[in-house]
Image (cartoon, rainbow, N blue to C red):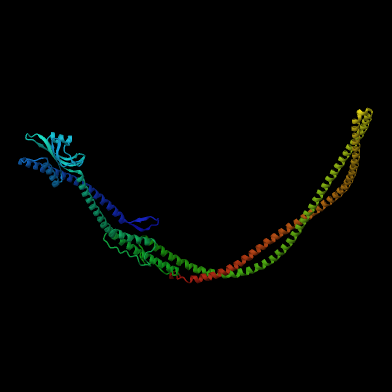
Amino acid sequence: MVIAMKNDKNKKIHHLGLKVNVVVAALLIVSIVVVLQVCVSMFRSLTMDMLENECVNANSVLESQLMEIVESGASVDSEDITLLLDELKEDLGCEFTIFNGDVRAYTTILQDGKRAVGTKLSEKLAAIVLEQGKSYVGEAQILGVDHVCSYIPTKDENGKVNGLLFAGISMQNATGQINKTINTVIIVGGILVVVGLILLSAYIRHRVSKPLSRLTELAQTMERGDLGIKSKKMVINIHSNDEVGFLAQTFENTMSRLNGYIGEISTVLDSISQGNLTVATNLEYIGDFASIKESLDDILDKLNNTMSQIIESSDSVSSGAEQMAIGATALSQGAVEQASSVEDLDRNIRDISDQVGNTAENAQQANKEVESVSERLIESNRKMQEMINAMQEINDRSNEIGKIIKTIENISAQTNILALNAAVEAARAGEAGKGFAVVAEEVRELASKSAEASQTTTALIERSIDAVEEGTRIANETASQLMEVVSGANEIVDVTNKIADAARSQADSVFLIKEQISQISNVVQTNSATAQQSAATSQELSQQAGVLKDLMRTFRLNTRYLN
């Protein structure tokens, strides 16, 4: 059984009664098992002895019956003897066999549903009974089946062993009877164990487990801080004259003492919380609890002493706070007026700074614009020079083309003369030169057209050269004027730079003045705020001093600490 609770480490607490029950049950079971083994061994030995005695007695009965038949002189046949054996088997519960030598002549033992007549005795038993003439009692295997048996030799008139008598009980039947008896003993032993465990468990539960469970519950309740001061439910109700009862009584005395201590400590602390410092501890604290009493008394003494000093100090603080509040108020008013004047000065300086800053920004912007215009003029002048150079290059190339055209005209004239000479020579040649005359005429016409094209091209080039020269002249004049403009723009840039530098320097100076005025304004405002805070703090301190005096009136001090 496991108690339905856990300790601080979530470890399950096992019932002590369970441990005792387990140990006792284990010892009881081991003892019963050992006893049962001894009893079973003894019972088996006794049973085997009883079975052997039964076999011996059965053999004696068979021998007696046969002696009576012999002595009576009555004639008997094999059926009569077989019937006798069957009757004895039914009456005594044993198997019987009559051997003639080592061969079974009459028997009640069946093999394959038939009497095992004609089968032989084992050599081991034949040596003991037939050869040595001794009786044999014990276990033997007959036709593959174990038996408890008794063999006694039979003798003829001369005293020579001529056969033997057998009486036996099958071990299967004996084992079944033994197992039945053992099972009965085991069942009875198990019932006794269960009953013993139930009674023992009930006793342990009543005398050990239940009281300890109650003490455990109370201990856990105390662990949660509940000592029954308010609930009044901490009743142990355990009465016994053993160690558990003594433990319960000790537990109850401890709880009672703790209740008294904690109750008084609670009363003292409650009185202290309400301002009553006249209380004192009255109970006798023993052992380590004596230090608690000393600590409480020391706390009360120190609180009384401290509170009396606080009352005296609060009067002094209240008086000083009133004087400080008056001075701080006057200082605050002067600081506020000074802050107002500095704020006006700061505002004017800020306006001047903004104006100077705007001027500097405008001058800077004008400087940038003039520099931009100057850069564009310089770029225009550079482009104009490039255009003049390009036009000069065109003029030079045009002159070269003119020279080439003159060369073409000369070639055309020479070609015309050659064509004329070729025509003259073709006329001289007659019919043979007609084809050559046609070619010469075509060449002359081509040369004439080339001369005309060259003259036309020459005229065009000359006009282009004239136009280029005129454009070059105009471009040179424009470039000269642009140079003058660039020079003037550079002078304007220099003047604008000087203006921008001066405006920037003025703006920096005004900015420094503004920063210094702002710092002065911040200091003045800080002083004003500090003065106002000091005034407010002084007034608050004066009020708090009054509140402190009112609070101290709520404490009741011991008379020996009052002046």
343 displayed left or right of 105: right
291 displayed left or right of 401: left
Given the current orientation, which residue lies at the most extreme left position? 72
Residue at left offset 73%, top offset 61%: 354
Residue at left offset 13%, top offset 45%: 87
- The answer to which of 193 and 336 lies nearer the viewer is 193
- The answer to which of 262 and 284 lies nearer the viewer is 262
Q: Quadrant of residue 2?
A: bottom left
- Image spot of residue 5 (x, y percent): 37, 59
Given the current orientation, which residue lies at the most extreme front position? 431
- The answer to which of 42 and 68 lies nearer the viewer is 68
Residue at left offset 51%, top offset 71%: 549
Q: Is residue 41 visible?
A: no
- The answer to which of 363 and 309 lies nearer the viewer is 363
Q: Is residue 23 visible?
A: yes
Q: Quadrant of residue 509?
A: bottom right
Q: Quadrant of the N terminus?
A: bottom left
Q: Quadrant of residue 171?
A: top left
467 displayed left or right of 495: right
Q: Compared to 424, does 531 lie above or below?
A: below
53 displayed left or right of 37: left
- Image spot of residue 366 (x, y percent): 78, 56
- Image spot of residue 531 (x, y percent): 62, 66
Total count of labels? 0
- Image spot of residue 257 (x, y percent): 35, 64
